Image: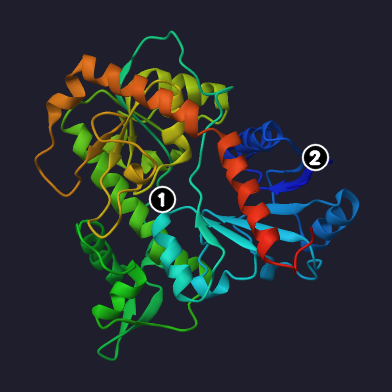
Amino acid sequence: MYKNNKIRVLLYLASNSPFYTNLYPSIKRGFQEAGCVVEGGANLLTDDELIQKIDSFKPDFVFEMNRVKSEIKKFPNGVIHICWLVDFWGRLHDELKGSDILYVWADEWVKHFQKIGMKEVYYLPPATDMAIYKQLKVKKNYDFTFLGHISKNWTDEELFREVGLKDKKIVYFRDLLPFAQKYVTAKNNTTSFLDSLIDEDIILNNSIDKTLIYDISNRTYRQIRRELYIDIFTKISDNIAIYGSENWKHYDKYNSHYRGYISKANEINKAINESNVLLHDGNYPHFRTFDAMASGVVVAAAQAPDNFNNPWEKLGFKDAQDYLNVDIYSDKINNELFKDEKLLKKISQNAREKVLKEHLWVHRAQRVLEDVSDLLKRDKRVKK
């Protein structure tokens, strides 16, 4: 793409939280291993700060997480802007336009953006850093481990927020929770949860703010699904470790499993290594799933709804060979799979080999560079 000079990348993630401050050096290293000069940070800059940085660093492209170019005032013409959308932050699809390339967290999201006319939109899964996530010679203290946060139980103030109308009667946030439960536990959803409310004759207020939209479309879903998923495994074994924010303490049924909050990458790697299986409740591969695989730990992933293409198969992973696909919509979970030590060892070895070969950050960086090169060939509006 650039024959004589190294590609210059400005890289910014979503925030200065421990998660992103750990993640930034790994993604940066991936671009460096792909031959780039990289500057940036874990936190998005203000518009003015970003423009100043572009003027001084003169990047070939800017790669930001969760912010699109149209949200940046006076973004310079001729500079390629790439957004990797991992979280909507309460925004709707048609608010997320403008970037020269939009990468999305889930393959299913691609078609929704294509429906509103976006062309340069692609699925970009997360990856891992083999310099951090690796096999350790430690005792397996737990059958299962879950890494992640959960929302606090809703306050009365949150529950009684007005969200819309149904049959000319006011609908409060609390009234949506049964519909969310129904949606999460349905094996075949043909629309998003927000769109499904239309089928229930619920008309949301146009004035709903982003926080409320996020609570409706994201927090409700995550809370219900995580409880559903973890409860499956508490029936298989009581030897489960949960790591995450102290919100877990608000759930009495998980008190005996909660092991606290860990933020350092090497401590997370150790926690993963101390378990036989990492539990993943999401529909798509996550940072932690590839981290676990690189650490030689089996991933048990929740099955996606029927209307989703199997995201693991799309990335070349096979059920019961590279990971365990858990049908959360069935009462018939094969408990014996999780007790078969030989099978678990074989799966962990297969997954580790595949991840180190195809799912490191350098592989994602190389994909980005290829897409930028293709963009430059097609689009004369961006600099070459």
Q: Secondary structure at mark 2?
A: loop
Q: Which mark is residue 6?
A: 2
Q: Secondary structure at mark 1?
A: loop
Counting labels gives 2
Q: Label 2 crowding class (10 Å Cα cut-off): few <14, some 14-19, many 20+?
A: some
Are circles 1 and 2 on residues that touch, CB within 8 Å? Answer: no
Q: Residue at x 38, y 38 (%)?
A: 249
Q: Residue at x 71, y 47 (%)?
A: 11
Judged left or right of residue 55, residue 283 is: left
Judged left or right of residue 13, residue 333 is: left
Mark 1: amino acid: Ser
Q: Which mark is residue 151?
A: 1
Mark 2: amino acid: Lys
Q: Between 83 and 383, which is closer to the camera in this rendering? A: 383
Measure the C-alpha gap from mark 1 to mark 2. Answer: 43 Å
Can residue 380 be seen from the camera position used here? yes
